Amino acid sequence: MSLTVLLTQLEQLSAQLEALLDQEFECLKASDIEAFEILQSEKAQVLAALGDPAAIDAINTLQADSTIIAEHGAEANLQWAVITDSLVRCKDKHQRNEIVITRKLDTVRAALDTIKSPNLQNTVDTYDRLGRLGNRGGKSSLGKV
């Protein structure tokens, strides 16, 4: 495979992955789990292509020896810069999506823990209209003399 073909393929795959990560984020924001799951198969295909042993060997070679790209001219240099920038953005977007998923899971777990609790008054802190922590355990301030 020639360097030009490889760079073009990597550029397309990195752009496709970046677009999928943006779509994934939109699905997460909208809590559209069905669309999110559909994107996972597409993302897996792109990641499989990027993770192909031949592609990884080529990327490692290009990273180790920058003269290979320089020998192919400014266009190859520009393409490589676009690819590396895109993959850095993909990493950041993946981390962003992971944070959103983790927060949503934490919220669901907290809600499930609250529902499962035998005594809701002992586990839930509530606030009154003034923003102060309300009474816990059903204690009433009216009975105090």
Image (cartoon, grey):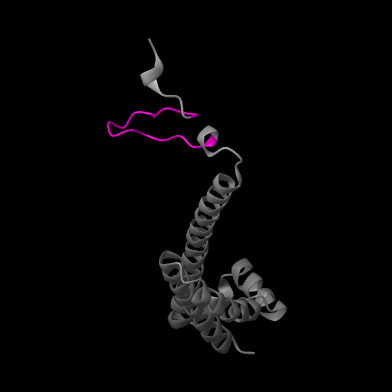
The answer to whether 117 appears left or right of 138 in the picture is: right
> Which residue ends up furthest to the top in the rendered image?
145
Q: Is residue 65 visible?
A: yes
Q: Nearer the viewer, residue 133 or 70?
A: 133
Q: Is residue 72 visible?
A: no
Q: Main secondary structure of the magenta part?
A: loop
Residue at horizontal 45 percent and vertical 34 percent from the top: 125
> What is the span of residues highlighted in magenta in the rendered image?
123-137
Q: Quadrant of the N terminus?
A: bottom right
List x then y, in percent, for residue 145: 38, 9
Residue at the image position 60 percent from the left and 68 percent from the top: 63
Q: Position of residue 71 (x, y in %)?
A: 53, 80
Q: Position of 113 compared to 139: left or right?
A: right
Residue 130 is one of the magenta-drawn residues: yes
Answer above or below: position of 82 versus 123: below
Across and down, in percent, residue 85 comes to 46, 68
Would you say residue 65 sits in the magenta stretch? no
Q: Position of residue 97 (x, y in %)?
A: 49, 62
Residue nearer the viewer, 46 or 31: 31
In the rendered view, would you say 114 is above or below 129?
below
